């Protein structure tokens, strides 16, 4: 038998299909988390939605193109033929391409690349939760709040307020909180003592990886379980709150468990009602 070495007559290993398939899986995971659900809000800011959709679409298109090209190449694999004298030889319609494939595999690199399939498959088939009490209880200093010009509060029996505004006012404008009933929304973490616990929100700059904790120390009611989302109504407990580690305290008279908000990282005031 003559012609090219034996390895040229065999199809490339599955890894040649695996890399474009990995692109398809990753893109499909992004699209599932953005187009078909709000899952992406557990990991990144809402403003990144169009970029995630565009990236997922591009990855799927590139992966499908790669799969199509590899399938077409396999259909042109060398075939064993006989010449006029009966001698067998390899006939390869894509001779140049086959010569470029020298038989030295890159199995190690491919196996490492397949690790990227884990987050892709996770997005496709599992729904990891948003960050919660584990992150908040292990974060260092509480997130700082910027000094700003706060509007005068309306004369109402109870004022819904975002956690960051409540913390900011306690640092820079505490007189606006004196004697007022405030309603806040957040999730629960255990406190440093049995008679207190923390109401928390996680603030992100870009994604969950840079999340910082906003927290208020709660007194007056028994703590629900960790990660329970609640609305609390109470009054600011007077005391010094430092700008370096702002954790004000609140005496709470009413507590209501609620569902996790659509966007857990968007610190908004509780809705009326």
Image (spheres, rainbow, N blue to C red):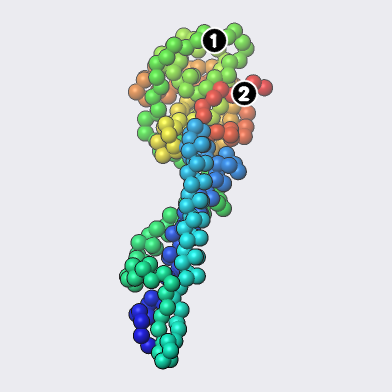
Q: CA distance from mark 1 to mark 2?
A: 16 Å
Element carrying mark 1: loop
Label number found at residue 153? 1
Q: Position of residue 108 (x, y in %)?
A: 35, 65
Residue at point 50%, 65% (across, down) = 71
Circle 2 residues within 10 Å: few <14, some 14–19, many ≥20: few
Q: Is residue 270 visible?
A: yes
Give the numbered dot on residue 36: none
Of the 4 image quadrants, the one containing the C terminus is top right
Image height of 6 relative to 235, above or below = below
Foreground residue, 28 or 226? 28
Q: Disc 1 or 2, which lies upstream in sequence?
A: 1
State the residue position of label 2: 271
Residue 104 falls in which quadrant of the image? Answer: bottom left
Q: Badge 1 local density, few (<14 within 10 Å), some, or many (20+)? A: few
Q: List x then y, in percent, for residue 205.
A: 42, 31
Relative placement, left or right, of 262 versus 62 is right
- The residue shown at (46%, 79%) is 79
Q: Quadrant of residue 111?
A: bottom left
Asked whether the viewer can see residue 252, the reply is no
> Residue at 43% of width from left, 72% of height from top?
93
Q: Nearer the viewer, residue 35 or 8?
A: 8
Please tell me which residue lies in front, 224 or 110.
110
* Percent of width and height locating residue 109: 35, 61
**How many circles with numbers are drawn on the protein?**
2
Tell me residue 36's x, y (percent): 60, 43
């Amino acid at each position: 038998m003559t012609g090219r070495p034996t390895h040229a007559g065999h199809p490339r290993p599955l890894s040649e299909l695996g890399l474009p398939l990995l692109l398809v899986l990753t893109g499909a995971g992004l699209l599932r988390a953005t187009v078909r659900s709000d899952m992406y809000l557990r990991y990144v800011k809402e403003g990144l939605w169009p970029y995630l959709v565009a990236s997922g679409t591009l990855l799927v298109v590139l992966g499908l193109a790669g799969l199509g090209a590899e399938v077409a190449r396999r259909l042109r694999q060398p075939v064993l033929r006989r010449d006029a004298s009966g001698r067998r030889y390899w006939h390869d319609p894509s001779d140049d391409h086959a010569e470029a494939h020298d038989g030295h595999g890159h199995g190690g690199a491919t196996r490492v690349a397949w690790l990227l399939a884990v987050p892709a498959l996770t997005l496709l088939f599992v729904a990891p939760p948003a960050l919660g009490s584990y992150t908040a209880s292990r974060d260092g200093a509480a997130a700082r709040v910027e000094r700003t010009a706060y509007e005068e509060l309306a004369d109402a029996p109870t004022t819904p307020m975002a956690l960051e505004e409540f913390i900011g006012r306690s640092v820079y404008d505490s007189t606006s909180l004196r004697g007022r009933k405030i309603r806040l929304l957040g999730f629960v973490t255990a406190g440093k003592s049995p008679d207190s616990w923390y109401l928390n929100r996680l603030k992100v700059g870009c994604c969950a990886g840079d999340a910082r904790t906003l927290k208020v120390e709660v007194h007056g009611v028994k703590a629900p379980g960790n990660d329970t989302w609640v609305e609390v109504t109470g009054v600011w407990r007077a005391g010094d709150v430092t700008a370096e580690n702002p954790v004000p305290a609140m005496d709470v008279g009413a507590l209501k468990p609620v569902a996790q908000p659509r966007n857990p990282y968007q610190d908004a005031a509780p809705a009326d009602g």
